[in-house]
Each structure stands twice: as C-alpha cells, then as structure tokens.
Image (cartoon, helix red, strand yellow):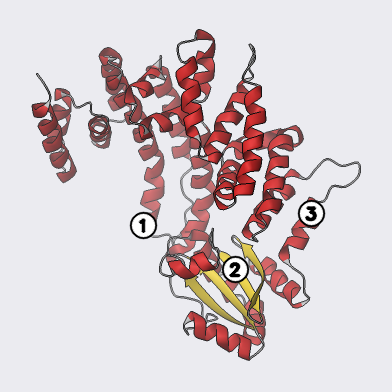
Amino acid sequence: MIGTLAALVLVLFVAPLAAEAGRDDPPPVFDRRPYAEARQAAEKDKKWFVVKATAVWCGPCKQMDRTTWRDDKVVKWLEANAVVVALDVDQEKALSKELAIRAMPTMVAFKDGKEFDRIVGYKDPGDFLAWLEGMAKGKKSIEAVRERAAPHEGEKANVQARYDLARELFHSGKTAEAADEYVWLWKNMLAQEPAMYGVRLSFMASDMEQVAEADAGAKAKFATLRDETGKALEGEKVDQNDLLDWVALNRILGEQARTLAWYDKVKDEPRWRPMIRRVSRDLEEIFIKQKRWADVGRLYPEPLKVLEEEQRMLEMLAAHKPPDMPDMPAEMRKEMEETPRRMFRDKVSRIYAGLLAAERETDAEAFAAKARELDPAAGMPLNLASTALQAGQPRRVHLEWLERDASPEAARLHIKVKGELERAPK
C-alpha cells in the first residue's frame, strides 16, 4: 500500500509543479558564459557566485524559472550582488558530482571561491530573497531550520521541522548529523505525529537510503537501528509494525537478502502468513529481482480480493485529475492521466505472472479474466502477456489475445511468445 500511496502523493502534488514546464525560455538573469568563466568573473568582481542545478525534466525547476528567477526584487538583488548560472545535471555530470548535487533544484552560493551555503527544492520569490539577504548578513539557511526544530519547554517536538532539518543537514554535507536526526525521527516520529506513518516508510525511508549510500558511518547507525528492531522479531508474539520497520530498514541499507532469508525461514509457518501479507510489496520486488516468480504467486492466496483492492485504489487515483492549466503540454497531461492505469496494469500483470509460475493455472485464468473485464482496453492483455513472458510463463492463450491487437508492439510480442512456446519442451 505504501508504494501506491506515495504515487498518489506524486500525482496530486507534483502535478501542479510539473505543469509549469510549459515555458522553456531561460530567465534573463542567468549568465550565458561557461561555468568556469562566470565563476572567475564573480570572484574578480567580489560578487556572489550562485549556481542553480536543474534538469529539463524537473517541474519545480521550471516553476522557479517562471516565477522566482523573474521576480523583480530577486532579479534586482542578483544583478547588483551576484553572477548566476544554470547547471544542467544531465549535461554536466562531472561538475554535478563535484558539487555533490543530489536533488533538483539545488541552489549553491559561493563567496570568494568557497561554498557558503546551499538550499534545495522549490523556493518562492519571498523565501528565495530572504535566503539571499540572509547570506549577505552572514547567515546560513540551516540556522533558521535549526531554530524551528529546536525543542521548546512544555511543547511536543516539531516533527516536520526536525524532518526538514535532517534533509537540510544531508544536502549541506553534514551527513553524520543528518543520520542522528533520522535515527531520532525513526524512533520518535510516530509517538509525536502518528499521521506521518506513511511518510516515514516511504519518503523518509528513501531519504535515509541516500544517506546510507553516501556515508558508511550513517549506514552503521541505521544498521544498529535495524538490529535493535530485529530483536523484537525473535519472540513468540511479534508486532507487525516491528516487522514493517525491519523490512524497511533492510531496504534502506540495501540488505534485502536478510528479508529474503527471513521469508525462506518462516514461509511455511501458518502464524507468519498474515505478517508476510503485510510486507508483500517489499517481498514482491525482491522476488522479481531474484527471478523467483513462483514466490510472487504464493504471496497472494486470494488474488481476486487483491485485484478488487487495486481496482479501488485505481478509481481513487483516477478521480484526482491534473489541474486545468492552459500551459501544461498535452503530452504531459496525457502521461499524468495515464499513470494510475499503468500502475494498475503493472501490478496486476506481476501477480498474474506469479500465479502462472506457481502452477496456479485455474487461479491465473480467473484472475486474468477479471482483470480484462475491469480494464477491457488492449493495454491490459498486452501487459499480462508481456510480464508472463518476462517470467518465463508464455501460454497459447496469449497468442489469441495478441492476435486481436493490431499494434506493432503486439505483433512483436506475438513473435516472441510464439518462439518461446515452440522452443518449450513438449
């Protein structure tokens, strides 16, 4: 469920930002000289050198191009005090790595050749100007975040502020401090703000994964957290939240082999079946990477019920259409509108392929029939047949489905399925 809900958040909240991509002309405030030349000019003139790390696919970057970087007050300050350049991270990969760019947009400010401060994420004109003016007074952005996150006597912790602080610390290169904040959040977040349960296992877990990849010390702290959680799984009574945490921490650490080993140990014990269902999404991803498709099929004892759940989620996602913005490119709107349906088909197709691999032919047949009834468009049988082939489970019926589809993609897939069936032992 977490993965689907995260996608819902992206559809609903990233969409308005991505919509700003309709205007591609760069703001005039950006210097057109090469990076090195512009930086030398800034140092020579004793000005700030401000770098905006961006990408053509970055919706928030485009929105800043349209608003913040064209704001009269922002432009006036920059023209008087700075040289500003835009850095495309896809075209300047070596430079992006040198600057430790991990997210877009990132704004990095240099003074006298040395980095002074950086901020990450969309900033409206007011917030961006406040950052610039604060720098001029020698104040770094993280100081304000620390102030918001500082505990106040008699008040509960500001969890959102501490989450913001953890992210700012990481993007500022203070990885050890960031890791400490994430450990505190992992242990205390839900007691303070239960509503952040989904954020903790999705967005925050993704942040922690980046921190673990960047710093061995941080990874060791998260491993200790994982091992402490793992002890709670050793008793007779296990809290499902402890299991969810342990599996998520294995994912954060890149050690899903531990999760797989646990599954192989308990998979035949009835008392663990409800728990296995709770972590089925993580297990499904692991099984597919390991090409253990039969195990995917065993995850879902009642596949039609799961299909109904996924259909309800699809309906909820589809009900939230992108906002009506005239500048949104037609292809972007189409992509956003089709994303929930594509997610549904991908999930359904993985389950179907798993059922076939687990030799649950009757269940697979009923599942595919219901899936095609719920989604009668040509894309569903194409997805079902394609994923089944990926899992090494082609069937004669797939040829019949594909023969009803006149698309070139269906024709190519038909050839592959037919070839695999002909090569299969009789």
Q: Quick one: label 3, few (<14), some, or many (20+) residues within 10 Å?
A: some
| Residue 184 as seen in the image, left or right of residue 307 | right
Evaluate whether residue 404 shows in this view. Answer: no
Cα separation between marks 3 and 2: 21 Å
Callout 1 secondary element: helix
In front: 204, or 98?
98
Cα separation between marks 1 and 2: 30 Å
In front: 354, or 78?
354
Q: Residue at x 91, y 44 (%)?
A: 153
Q: Quick one: label 2, few (<14), some, or many (20+) residues within 10 Å?
A: many
Of callouts 3 and 2, the N-terminal one: 2
Q: Which mark is residue 314?
A: none
Q: Residue at x 28, y 27 (%)?
A: 372
Looking at this rendering, what residue extends furthest in the right direction? 153
Callout 3 secondary element: helix
In the image, residue 271 lies at what x, y percent?
54, 10
Of callouts 1 and 3, the N-terminal one: 3
Q: In the displayed structure, would residue 52 be above or below residue 219?
A: below
Q: Which mark is residue 330?
A: 1
Residue identifier under label 2: 107
Q: Amino acid at mark 3?
A: Arg
User: Which quarter of the rendering shows the C terminus?
Assistant: top left
In the image, residue 253 lies at what x, y percent?
55, 40
Q: Amino acid at mark 2?
A: Met
Q: Residue at x 16, y 43 (%)?
A: 407
Does the residue at mark 1 contact the one at mark 2 (Cβ under 8 Å)? no
In front: 199, or 308?
199
Callout 2 secondary element: strand
Evaluate whether residue 129 shows in this view. Answer: yes
Q: Which mark is residue 148?
A: 3
In the image, residue 134 lies at what x, y percent?
75, 72
